[in-house]
Image: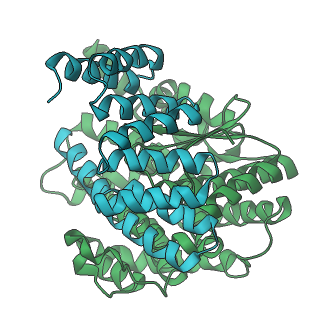
Chain colours: A green, B cyan
Amino acid sequence: MKTDMPLSKPIRLFIANTEEILNTEISLLRQPEADPGGTLVDEYTYDIDHNIIIFPAQYIGLLKDFVIAKHCTHLLIKGAAAKKAKYLVCSYNEESMYRGMRQIYLDALKDEAKKENRLPVQKLIQMLFILFSQFNDDVNELPWNAIINASVYHRMPKIRKTQLYHVMKESKNDMDEMMEQESIVPRRYFVLDKAMFYARDMFLAKTLPADELMPVINIPQMKKFNHLEVKEMLTTRWTQTAWYQSKVFGDQMLDIMEKPLGPVVWTEPPSLDYFYNLYKVGVLMTDNLLTYMTMRDWFVWEEPKHLLAAHEKKEEYEKNALTRIFGDLISDAWEDQA
Amino acid sequence: MPQKEVIELLKKGRTLAKRTKFKDALAHFEKAITLDPKYPEGWYLRASVFADTGQYKEALENCDKAISLDQNYADAWTKKSMVLYNMERFEEALMASTRASSLNGNDATAWYIRGVCLDELDRSDEAQVAYGKSLELEIILDMEAEQKRMRQQ
């Protein structure tokens, strides 16, 4: 481990344990503009020889420790998969993107037919790819987020209050996501996306039930949650907002998530086998969620470099998908733009 | 009251240190110390550069010098506690962080170091209290950073 910053004892030991299990090295990096949830730059995803956990400069104590715990757990899952078999992610190719964008287009047409103020064609076209990408990001993040949070909660009792703060904050940010696009996104996808986060939150609410948000009640913004359990906090948030309709789908998704997560023994001694098993649980959960949302053929399980290459080619894929969906009409539009 | 030139040198040095140009920063701090050796901030900032570059013995000496000039210099006590923690002198680090947090109760780092040291000394219950206070302060900092980010967007 390369760092001279102070770390709480359980985190220091966890990093050392992670490095030992994976036979690798982890560096910690503080950056003023880092993502609030931190970032993991790892050797299983990128072509580098060690791993870096980056976190915001204002995280000096336990907030930093939680971000490290979270990313170390993710690293263990990725590393175990890479060492025991293959680490795969939900990627896409030209054909799968076409299938996804076409499906979104057909659903959008149904929505548009019912609308008084129809979406301008150009916006509708742009939305297809944006929405496809959004779901790709979310399915690659959300199931792992649930697994990692549950694992950290059971393995690191000393940072539970910090975790609660992160969960509450993350939940709020995820709820607010796509807000600006609400009027243009087909209802089905808006609800499905929110439902995924609802299910994640409800799973975490069940997993993290015993702690109250004390001692952070001295912070005015958090006072409204005083003495509420996590479950109460998250349920209140979801049921008193416009996303209430996500609950119907969200409850189904919660059921889908709980099935593979139910048998997991979270306190088993950490080992490659154990974290590989968590990886398999995450893959199964992702597959089941994709099936429920009828998106199985939108994505392909591939190595991370495939996804990175797909991102590089995404504009080309998008253009070809749009040509296949709209035919000559879209080619004319591009020529007009040029 | 330090000379204007000293203040300017320290300001420039601090900016250089932020950009990890430690050698240049050190040169500025050393000049400021030469001009006004009784001004504790010069010693404290020099200690910070030594700490950031892993020269803990020198960092500690500079912290002690700053503290000898101003016994109530909270930041110097916090820096000293961090340096001692890195030298694995946990008992002494605990004393320094306790002093820092009593001088400035809103210093999240001082509370955190206190928690970390208590944890290392197997005084877990006391560590939890210190961690709790540190978290409370850190969340306030985080919320402020979040608001700033939202204003910029």
**Rendered residue at 80%/71% (across/down):** A269
**Rendered residue at 50%/27% (across/down):** A320
Residue B92 in the image: above or below residue A289: above
Question: Quarter holding the C terminus of chain A?
Answer: top left
Question: Quarter holding the N terminus of chain A?
Answer: top right
Residue B69 falls left or right of residue A21:
left
Picture coordinates of residue B22, whole percent (x, y): 46, 20
In this view of the protein, which residue sits in the foreground, A41 or B107? B107
Residue B61 in the image: above or below residue A16: above
**Rendered residue at 66%/32% (across/down):** A46
Picture coordinates of residue B123, whole percent (x, y): 59, 75
In this view of the protein, which residue sits in the foreground, A116 or A82? A82
Picture coordinates of residue A232, whole percent (x, y): 36, 86
Q: Quadrant of residue A119?
A: top left
Q: Quadrant of residue B109?
A: bottom left
Residue A131 falls left or right of residue A89:
left
In this view of the protein, which residue sits in the foreground, A230 or A182? A230
Residue B74 in the image: above or below residue A47: below
Picture coordinates of residue B33, whole percent (x, y): 33, 21
In this view of the protein, which residue sits in the foreground, B15 or A91? B15
**Rendered residue at 47%/39% (across/down):** A30
Residue A22 falls left or right of residue A114:
right
